[in-house]
Amino acid sequence: MLGGVIEEFMDLPPKQGSPEFFEWSEKRERVEAALHDNGFRYYRFGRILPLGHIPADDIPYEETLRISQQPVIPHKVEALLERLVRGLQRAMHPLTHRRKGSQNLTFSNEYDVQDLLHSLLRPWIQDIRPEEFTPSYAGSSTRMDFLLPAHELVLETKIVRDRGHAKKIGDELIIDIEHYRRHSECKNLWCIVYDPNKYITNSQGFKSDLEGERSSKDGKVLVKVYVI
C-alpha cells in the first residue's frame, strides 16, 4: 500500500537540471533514508521490501544489486543530523551486543549518549564545540551539549531516568530553551530525548508542546524535538 502511494513521486522525476529536480532529489533522499532507518528499501514500480530482499522480476539483477548496496548520502547538514539522531539506537546495538569475550557498552546516562553522538558527528562536521556556556538566565547559566557554530545549531541530549523524571523533563527543556535563545550563535535547537523504557506516554504531545519558534526581546530560536 505504501509503495502504491509513493510510486508516482519516486519513479517520475521532474526534468533533470531544473529547480524542481533538485527539490525532488532532496525529498526522495529523505524518503529513502526514512525507509532505510526502518529496515526497508524502495524499488521501482511501487515495491517496498525489507533490506536484503531483492525483487526477482522486472529489474535486472546487476542493477538491483547496485541500487541495494548504494548508500544514501545526505547533502544538507539537517538531513545528516536527522539520520544520525534517528539512527542512534541502531548505532548503539553493536556496542551493547558485542562479540563473546568483549565487554558490552551501556547507555545509561546522558554522557554515554552524548559521547556516541559526538563520535558520529566528528567525521562529518569539523567545528563541534561541546560544553560551551550559555548566557545567564534567572541568575544562572548552563552548558550546551554541542554547538555547531557554522550552522548556528545546538544539540541538547536528555535521557529519561524514570517515570517521575518523565514528568519533569519538559520543564527542564523549557529552561534550557530560555538559556539557548540568548546565545548569539544558536538559531536552531535540537532536543534529543533518549527514552529507552518509554516513560514518556504521549511523545507526540510532548513534542508539540516544545517544538516551534520561541522568541522574545532576548532573541529567538527554532526548536525541534526527537524522542528516541
Image (cartoon, rainbow, N blue to C red):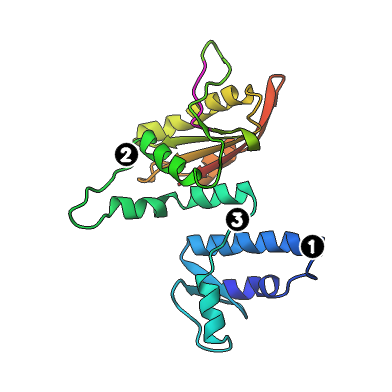
Tell me the residue at 57%/50% (across/down): 80
The answer to whether the residues at label 3 and label 1 have Cβ atoms under 8 Å apart is no
Indicate which disc residue 20 carries: 1
Residue occupying the far top of the picture: 139
Q: Is residue 12 visible?
A: yes
- Earlier-in-chain disc, 3 versus 1: 1
Identified by mark 1, the residue type is Glu
Q: Is residue 227 visible?
A: no
Q: Secondary structure at mark 1?
A: helix
Please say if 133 is above or below 153. above
- Comparing 141 with 72, the one in front is 72
Residue 93 shown in magenta: no
Indicate which disc residue 209 carries: none
- The percent coordinates of residue 4 (x first, y second) are 62, 76
Please say if 150 is above or below 26. above
Picture quarter with the N terminus: bottom right
Tell me the residue at 23%/57% (across/down): 99
For the stretch drawn in magenta, the main secondary structure is: loop
Which mark is nearer the camera, 2 or 3? 3
Pointer 2 local density, CA inside 10 Å: few below 14, some 14–19, many at least 20: few
Pointer 3 local density, CA inside 10 Å: few below 14, some 14–19, many at least 20: some
Tell me the residue at 59%/74% (across/down): 3
- The percent coordinates of residue 53 (x first, y second) are 45, 78
Identified by mark 2, the residue type is Ser
- Earlier-in-chain disc, 2 versus 1: 1
Q: CA distance from mark 2 to mark 1?
A: 45 Å
Pointer 1 local density, CA inside 10 Å: few below 14, some 14–19, many at least 20: few
